[in-house]
Amino acid sequence: MQNRILLGMLAAAWCAAAAAAPHAAQHWSYQGNESPAHWGGLSEAYALCRSGKNQSPVDLAKALHSSVDTVAFGYLPQRYEVENNGHTVEAKPQGREQTLAIGGKQFVLKQFHFHTPSEHTFKGRHFPMEAHFVHQTADGELAVVAVMFEEGRANPALAPLLADKLKPGQSADLAQALDIMPLFPANRAHFRLNGSLTTPPCSEGVYWVVMETPVSAAKAQIAAMHDIIGYANNRPLQPLNARVVVEEAE
Ligand SMILES: [Zn+2]
């Protein structure tokens, strides 16, 4: 499959803009002086990365059981633009809205992206990869659905995302519509908690849905995603503080 690669200079332009304008997004990374431990001090806009009390990711262990908040996926095969933004590989739906209902509330998929290894852990255990599906309501409420990956069979929905081996700043329009449902487990049981974005500005008030059942990806697919991203892009675990995790049955 030949995707159309756009040789954008997104990452470079973004860093230059940050240097030129103090109110533009401050550069951050996963390494050195701009690594997660420093995010809160890089910019006033990132203060929550240090001072927030409802930060993500967290370890998921003890949870209260519930069975009220079902998740209903309304995703259809769709065209996506895939970008290596220097922090992750991110796919944005083009055209028709992709929707998700959580407890009856409608969210629209804005983008999905990957972390290698996983950011959340289950009883202290990392998975080799985690996908985040970032959604928003019409009034700006954020919900992120997280899915863990384990090594096994190749995942057909990952293949087109990996095909172009995008370099930082490059993006590509997928040549064909992509069905992303293979990126979700059939079993809808999940952990639910309030948290934050796991990258600056670490905004809180994010509704997290972490699927309990991992999906499979070939070892080579996980390695390819890690190679494209270029380094481990998982924020360290954050304290749960006063939050309660709810475990929703299927
Ligand atoms: Zn993420």
Image (spheres, rainbow, N blue to C red):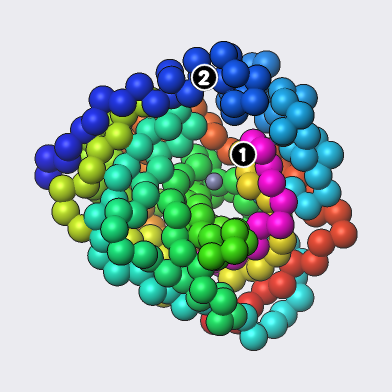
- Tell me the quadrant of the picture where the C terminus can be found: bottom right
Report which residue position mark 2 lands on. 17
Mark 1 lies within 8 Å of ligand 1 (Cβ measured) = yes
Residue occupying image coordinates x 80% and y 66%: 244
Q: Is residue 207 visible?
A: yes
User: Could you tell me residue 85's position as x and y percent?
Assistant: 42, 32
Against 39, residue 74 (above or below) is below
Q: What stretch is highlighted in magenta?
A: 200-213
Report the side of 199 relative to 232 (left or right).
Answer: right
Using the image as rendered, state which of residue 129 and residue 55 is in the foreground.
55
**Which x, y percent locates residue 122?**
64, 57
Instruction: Estimate how packed mark 1 is, as few (under 14), some (14 to 19) or many (20 or more) residues with alpha carbons within 10 Å.
Output: many
The residue lying furthest to the right in this view is 242
Identified by mark 1, the residue type is Thr
Mark 1 and mark 2 in contact (Cβ < 8 Å)? no
Residue under pointer 1: 199
Q: In which quarter of the image is residue 63?
A: bottom right
Q: Is residue 182 magenta?
A: no
Nearest-to-viewer mark from 2 and 1:
2
Q: Residue at x 59, y 71 (%)?
A: 190
Residue 1 image position (x, y, % from top left):
12, 44
Nearer to us in this view, 221 or 136 = 136
Of mark 2 and mark 1, the one earlier in the sequence is: 2
Relative vertical location of residue 139 with respect to residue 116 in this rendering, above or below: below
Distance between the Cα atoms at labels 2 and 1? 19 Å
173 left or right of 41 in image: left
Q: Which residue is painted at 36% across and 47% down in the image?
A: 91
* Residue under the image location 53 percent in, 32 percent down: 232
- Callout 2: CB less than 8 Å from ligand 1: no
